[in-house]
Amino acid sequence: MATRRSAEEIERLLEGYRHRTVTRAEYCQQQGISVSTLDYYLHRYGRKPAPRFARVKVKSQPAVAPVSFTVVLRNGRRIESAWEFCDAELARLIRVAEAE
């Protein structure tokens, strides 16, 4: 019957494996375990999951609403934009859009 290893023993084996200077098979032979047992330990305990979230500090900034507008022309066309036009440019845009 196989002996059960404690969590500390398994961690020691895995740590030794990570810092080994010999092949996997040689390491297992030195430790008196089978390669399949080492593979099981590596799969079950050896790979620590990467953190899925990182802690961040959020600084609140005053919300700046985008400058946007919608102009509905006489011919039914709509002009929607977030651009900032001066009065003369907006008037020219409307004239061109209504002319077509």
Image: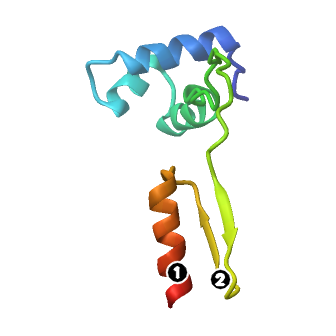
Amino acid marked by disc 2 = Arg
43 and 60: which is toward the camera: 60
Q: Residue 8 appears in which quarter of the rendering? A: top right
**How far across and how far down the image is residue 29, in percent?**
40, 25
Please determine whether, in this image, residue 92 is positioned above or below residue 29. below
**How far across and how far down the image is residue 66, in percent?**
62, 44
Category of crowding for the residue at label 1, using alpha-carbon neighbours closer than 10 angstroms: few (below 14), some (14–19), many (at least 20): some
Residue at 57%, 30% in the rendered image: 50
Q: Residue 64 appears in which quarter of the rendering? A: top right
83 and 11: which is toward the camera: 83
The residue to which callout 1 is attached is 97
Amino acid marked by disc 1 = Ala
Left or right for 49, reference 76: left
Left or right for 26, reference 72: left
Which residue is at the far bottom?
Answer: 100
60 and 37: which is toward the camera: 60
**How far across and how far down the image is residue 4, in percent?**
72, 20
**How far across and how far down the image is residue 98, in percent?**
56, 83
Q: Do the residues under discs 2 and 1 have CB atoms within 8 angstroms?
A: yes
Label 1 residue SS? helix
Residue at 68%, 14% in the rendered image: 7
Label 2 residue SS? loop
57 and 92: which is toward the camera: 92
Category of crowding for the residue at label 2, using alpha-carbon neighbours closer than 10 angstroms: few (below 14), some (14–19), many (at least 20): few
Gap between marks 2 and 1 measured at Cα? 8 Å
User: What number is the disc on residue 77?
Assistant: 2
Q: Earlier in the sequence, mark 2 or mark 1?
A: 2
- For the N terminus, the quadrant is top right
